Image (tube, grey):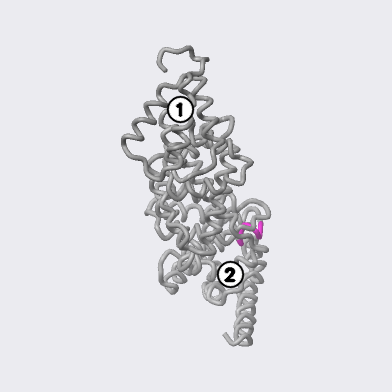
């Protein structure tokens, strides 16, 4: 088969096709069979390599199919990317991708690298991979035991920096899309329940934050902060769980980054007079404060943050911005649904005082009384 014209097809080519098909039907490949298949494939000319790749793509999936695909990829005959794109409109696509995520990590890495660097098909691959991750995570929400996410650490070792960023973004986008709240009021009402669910049940989120995002916490937070500030943002549940998971595992440098970001949002809220900005700030501060396994410590963390950033915001703001911030705080009171957080707001003094602060505090205490009565009437 050697020294042939690159456009001719050898009489031995059907033998190669039969060998590919046979090996796809074998669960475990012995060293001799592996060597023989590789040697056969090495003899193919350019036209035969193309035909062999097309032949493989039309074969039905079998027990050894992806082992053979890896051999084809290593010999640069057919990559996982080319194979998956050939199945773009097939019902087999998502099944293949779930198998990649469970066991075929080298093939999976090829997909993420192509998504990052392939100008022609990168966007299409990103969509395909994001859908696959979404399906996997939706399954984990229903049953956290269906996958151990064992692909995460091999990907971290295999992907170059740029591809790792693309991979991170896909994971964050897929997680955020798992739940949509009606509005930010639901996020305030459900905050503690969601955080507890993230800690106790949705542990795969923490696994991703600890393993996949371990060296990229600040980059991940930047993505999350940017998306959550978009108009009509509704993906509050997994935004808050992700922020809490990162805050509970990050290093001192990232903790300082979070504090700096929250302080900048106090300024932004007061200078823009935007209620949505304040609501985002309060929810984000609660999530970043919930960084321990002890509820009381988390509330103390939030109280400390609130005192330093809201109670003493007059030291941060210009005099003309303080009344604006105070007005926004008053507007935010109807959103409060959790007694322990409203109690913190009512207890911490705002400086300087004055009749506007007194009026706000009076309303704060009034809402607190209403909330307590509501809880009593429900038997809480």
Q: Is residue 31 above or below residue 336?
A: above
Q: Position of residue 90 (x, y in %)?
A: 62, 43
* Quadrant of the rendered image containing residue 68: top left
The mark found on residue 289 in the picture is: none
- Give the structural element (helix, strand or loop) at label 2: helix
Asked if residue 275 lies in the magenta stretch, the reply is yes
Q: Which residue is mark 1?
A: 15
Name the residue rendered at 53%, 26% in the picture: 51
Q: CA distance from mark 1 to mark 2?
A: 63 Å
Q: Is residue 46 above or below residue 195?
A: above
Q: Position of residue 360 (x, y in %)?
A: 63, 72
The mark found on residue 190 in the picture is: 2
Answer few, some or many: residues within 10 Å of disc 2's Cα (few below 14, many 20 plus, some between 14 and 19): some
- Give the structural element (helix, strand or loop) at label 1: helix
**Frontmost residue, 348 versus 353:** 348
Q: Which residues are magenta?
A: 274-279
The quadrant of the image that shows the C terminus is: bottom right
Name the residue rendered at 57%, 59% in the picture: 281
Q: Is residue 25 above or below residue 304?
A: above
Q: Position of residue 206 (x, y in %)?
A: 44, 59
Residue contact at pointers 1 and 2, CB within 8 angstroms = no
Answer few, some or many: residues within 10 Å of disc 1's Cα (few below 14, many 20 plus, some between 14 and 19): few
Mark closer to the chain start, 1 or 2: 1
Q: Nearer the viewer, mark 1 or mark 2?
A: 1
């Amino acid at each position: 088969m050697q020294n042939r014209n690159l456009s001719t097809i050898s009489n031995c080519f059907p033998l190669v096709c039969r060998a590919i098909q046979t090996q796809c039907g074998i669960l475990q490949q012995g060293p001799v069979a592996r060597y023989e298949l590789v040697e056969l494939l090495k003899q193919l000319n350019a036209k035969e390599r193309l035909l062999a790749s097309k032949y493989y793509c039309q074969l039905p999936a079998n027990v050894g199919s992806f082992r053979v695909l890896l051999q084809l990829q290593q010999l640069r005959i057919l990559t996982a990317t080319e194979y998956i794109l050939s199945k773009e409109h097939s019902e087999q696509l998502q099944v293949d991708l779930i198998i990649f995520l469970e066991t075929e990590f080298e093939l999976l890495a090829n997909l993420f690298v192509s998504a990052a660097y392939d100008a022609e098909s990168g966007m299409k691959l990103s969509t395909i991979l994001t859908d696959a991750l979404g399906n996997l995570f939706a399954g984990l929400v229903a049953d956290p035991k269906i996958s151990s996410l064992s692909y995460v650490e091999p990907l971290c070792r295999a992907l170059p920096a740029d591809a790792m960023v693309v991979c991170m973004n896909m994971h964050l986008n897929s997680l955020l899309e798992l739940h949509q709240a009606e509005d930010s009021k639901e996020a305030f009402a459900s905050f503690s329940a969601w955080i507890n669910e993230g800690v106790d049940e949705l542990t795969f989120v923490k696994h991703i934050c600890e393993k996949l995002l371990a060296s990229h916490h600040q980059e991940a937070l930047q993505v999350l902060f940017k998306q959550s500030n978009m108009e009509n943002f509704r993906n509050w549940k997994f935004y808050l769980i992700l922020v809490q998971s990162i805050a509970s595992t990050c290093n001192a440098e990232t903790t300082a980054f979070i504090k700096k970001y929250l302080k900048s949002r106090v300024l932004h809220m007061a200078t823009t007079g935007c209620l949505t900005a304040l609501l985002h700030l309060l929810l984000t501060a609660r999530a970043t404060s919930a960084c321990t396994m002890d509820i009381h410590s988390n509330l103390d963390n939030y109280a400390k943050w609130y005192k330093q950033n809201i109670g003493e915001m007059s030291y941060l703001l210009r005099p003309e911005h303080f009344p604006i911030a105070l007005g926004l705080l008053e507007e935010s009171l109807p959103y409060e649904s959790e007694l322990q957080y409203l109690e913190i707001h009512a207890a911490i003094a705002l400086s300087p005082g004055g009749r506007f602060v007194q009026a706000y505090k009076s309303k704060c205490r009034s809402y607190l009384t209403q909330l307590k009565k509501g809880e009593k009437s429900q038997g809480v």
